[in-house]
Image (tube, rainbow, N blue to C red):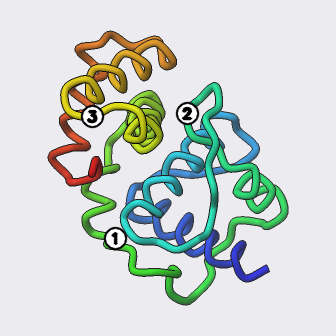
Amino acid sequence: MPRVHDLNRLISRLETDLGITLDAAQLDNRIQIQKLLYFAQEFGADFGYDYNMYIHGPYSPALARDYYDGEFREVEGNIPGNLDYANFLDNIEGKSNTWLALASTIHKLYGSYQMRYTGDELVEEVINAAANKKNASPDRAFSVFEQLNEEGLLS
């Protein structure tokens, strides 16, 4: 189960660096794990998880299987891929599960909607869909959209 060991490495490191506990027995923690790993892959980690849209935003069934199959424990070694960990940490540190769910939803929708829309229409469709799916105001969705865009995550 090399992927579970890789997952454990990142989870252990995040728990230490963020001062949090990510216990997969708790729903809020499972949501947070899903979103953190989603963004870790966007920042270069190579876990190979595929995501579908779900009620709480992007969701990976394979990731869910992995965090249920493996015990989270500190495992020595590197995180797979070329994760820009410092940049990743800067972008997720202090973010709530609500923010992570909205941001990952915006990011996932942006990637999907690029095939149908361009320019301002793309931005408007993504913001409206994300706001609707996450029960957020369009202004809040636009603010998160801008944060992701400033970090180069929407391209």
**SS at badge 2:** strand
User: Residue 120 is drawn in which quadrant?
Assistant: top left
Name which quarter of the figure residue 146 lies in: top left
Residue 96 can be seen, yes or no: no
Residue at image position (70%, 65%) is 72
Gap in angstroms between the C-alphas marked 3 and 2: 22 Å
The residue beneath circle 1 is 85
Sequence-wise, which precedes: disc 1 or disc 3? 1
- Residue type at mark 2 is Gly
Is 121 located above or below residue 138 in the figure?
below
Residue 143 at what x, y percent from top left?
Answer: 21, 26
Q: Quadrant of residue 148?
A: top left
Q: Nearer the viewer, residue 118 or 32?
A: 118
Q: SS for tag 3? A: loop
**Three-letter code for the amino acid on which mark 3 is drawn:** Thr
Question: Can you name the residue that lies furthest to the bottom here?
Answer: 77
Say the numbered circle drawn on residue 57: 2
Q: Residue at x 42, y 41 (%)?
A: 115
Q: CA distance from mark 1 to mark 2?
A: 22 Å
72 w.r.t. 103: above or below: below
Give the x, y percent position of residue 90.
Answer: 25, 57
Mark 3 Cα within 10 Å, few/some/many (few <14, many 20+)? few
Q: Which residue is mark 3?
A: 118
Checking the image for residue 103, the label placed there is none
Nearest to the eye among marks 1 and 2: give it. Answer: 2
